[in-house]
Amino acid sequence: MDATIGQSKNFSYSIISYVFFTFIGYFIIGLSLSVLPIFINKGLGFSMLVAGIVISLQYVMTFLMRAYSGKIIDSKGPKPAVLASMISFSFTGLVLVMAYYFRLSPIVSLLFLIITRFFTGCAEGMIGASPINWAIMTLGEKHTPKIISYNGVACYGALAIGASLGVTIVKHFNFYGLGILVILLGLIGFFIAKSKENRTGKHSEEEQKSFWNVLGKVAPFGLCLAFGGLGFATISTFITLYYDYYHWQNGAMCLSVFGVLFVTGRLVFSNAINRFGGINVAIVSLAVEGLGLTIITLSYHPYFALIGAGITGLGFSLIFPALGVMAMKTVPSSNQGSALAGYGLFIDISLGVTGPLIGGVADVFGLPYIFPFSIGIVLIGLALAYYLKMNQSK
């Protein structure tokens, strides 16, 4: 018994040693996620639509980098992608410092923020599938669901912690302190990754399908993921402005509660995908996410909004691994890097579209309408998941 427990712990530590890079990357992303929209809107004087577009530029670059990242992973292994990601993250910290330095010249500051978002997107595109594939290549394909789940915990846990900490850092040390921390974290990740052994797949070029061929295979599951991701993206991008609109305090806490329930869902229901099947878990998860967004919509007090954010996080927690396992089954092992990169594209699309789309809804109809709109999109995802289930059973 003790030996089994020890082996389980060692295996978990092995996974953590790879998804640690995901944690660093998304922690850096989270640090600026809750402070940049307010800085752009309140500090520089631009509209919420402009704030949403600038935030979303990150995901445009991430989208463009996914295919390149998948190709590198399949041909050269995940280590080069991780190293490039960490360097890019460090550079974003440097440019963020410049953006704050020129804050009295709003246009110049905004241009530096745009550069920051592009490099953040480049870094995210390279880190997205790399740690997962590194762990799978090292520990074996049979552990894919568990590795994806651990990676998700690292990702959204880091976003939640980073979002709350980012507000605190900016309050006490302004954006200079935030930028310096980002530079240091990127360098730490780079040197840790550099010390680890690279892994490459043993497949011939003939075995490897083109990225676009793989993308077509995973697209139905990725599209469903994109609809579900919009609920999370609305919270992560606009919740601080939403709280400010109602004169509520500590909007970033919603991201923390979201993250805590997200991690809890991954840990408590880690075996649900194997027991009930990926598509069934996705259907239930999308329904729970929709319920959480509904509670936020109907909230008349910030405490109820926190409850809604938590339920949303619980619902969203298993959508990525549930649909990801289904997507991975559509391609051979020689294309795992491209499959995960292609599948991850759809969450990038979701996050990228959310900024201008929800920002536009807020500017035209008002902030109270952003969550009812998000509910409608998540329900479309729920309908698509049910359609995929019906096709699967035929």
Image: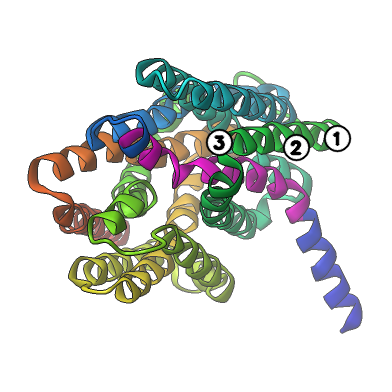
In the picture, measured across the screen, residue 41 lies left or right of residue 113, that is left
> Which residue does the image show at 44% across and 29% down from the upper left?
58
Name the front one of labels 3 and 2.
Answer: 3
> Which residue does the image show at 43% across and 69% down from the upper left?
314
Q: Earlier in the sequence, mark 1 or mark 3?
A: 3
Q: Earlier in the sequence, mark 2 or mark 1?
A: 2
> Which residue does the image show at 23% across and 55% down from the upper left?
245
Mark 1 crowdedness (10 Å alpha carbons): few <14, some 14-19, many ≥20: few
Checking the image for residue 189, the label placed there is: 2
In this view, the residue farthest toward the left is: 365
Measured in 3D between alpha carbons, the distance from the residue under mark 2 to the one under mark 1, in whole angstroms, is: 14 Å
Quadrant location, the N terminus: bottom right
Q: Which residue is mark 3?
A: 175
Region rendered in magenta: 15-41
Q: Earlier in the sequence, mark 3 or mark 2?
A: 3
Measured in 3D between alpha carbons, the distance from the residue under mark 1 to the one under mark 3, in whole angstroms, is: 35 Å
| Tag 2–tag 1 contact (CB < 8 Å) | no
